[in-house]
Amino acid sequence: VDQIPTDIYKEQGQTAIIYCSHRIDSYNKILWYKQLENGQLQYLGYLNIKNGNPEKGLNVTIEGDANKGETSTLTIKSLSESSSAVYFCAAN
C-alpha cells in the first residue's frame, strides 16, 4: 500500500486527512488503524469498494474507492492531543 502524507502537523481542533491506495487487482477493501501509546492497534473502520464503515463513536470518516489504483481517505475531525499517533492503512 501507499500512504501519504508520511507526517502531518496540525493544531488542535483542525482536521487531518490521510490517503491510502494499493496495486492489487483482487483487493477491494481498505482497513484503517491507529497505533495507541501502548503499541496496540485500534481498529478505526474500513472502506469496502466505495462504502465507508467507520467504527461507532470515533471522530473519523472513511471515504473514497478501495479498488486497485484508487484512493481511500481517513479524515480525523476536531483533532485533540489524543489524535497524535501513527495511523496505518491495509488492503484486503
Image (cartoon, rainbow, N blue to C red):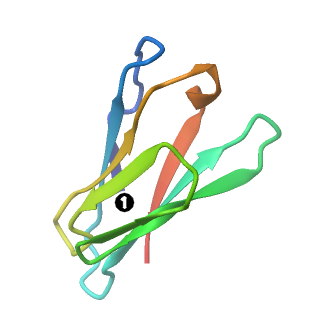
Kind of residue at disc 1: Val
Q: Which residue is mark 1?
A: 1
Residue 61 horizontal/vertical position (percent) = 37, 51
The outermost residue toward the left is 69
Please say if 46 is above or below 72.
below
The N terminus, quarter of image: bottom left
What's the residue at 33%, 82% (across, down)? 27
* Residue at the far right in the pictured view: 38
The picture quadrant where one finds residue 26 is bottom left
Picture coordinates of residue 6 (x, y %)? 39, 32
Is residue 84 found left or right of 37 in the rendered image?
Answer: left
Neighbour class for label 1 at 10 Å: few (<14), some, many (≥20)? few
Q: Nearer the viewer, residue 78 or 50?
A: 78
Q: Is residue 76 above or below residue 69?
A: above
The residue sitting at 56% across, 54% down in the picture is 33
Residue sitting nearer the eye, 91 or 82: 82
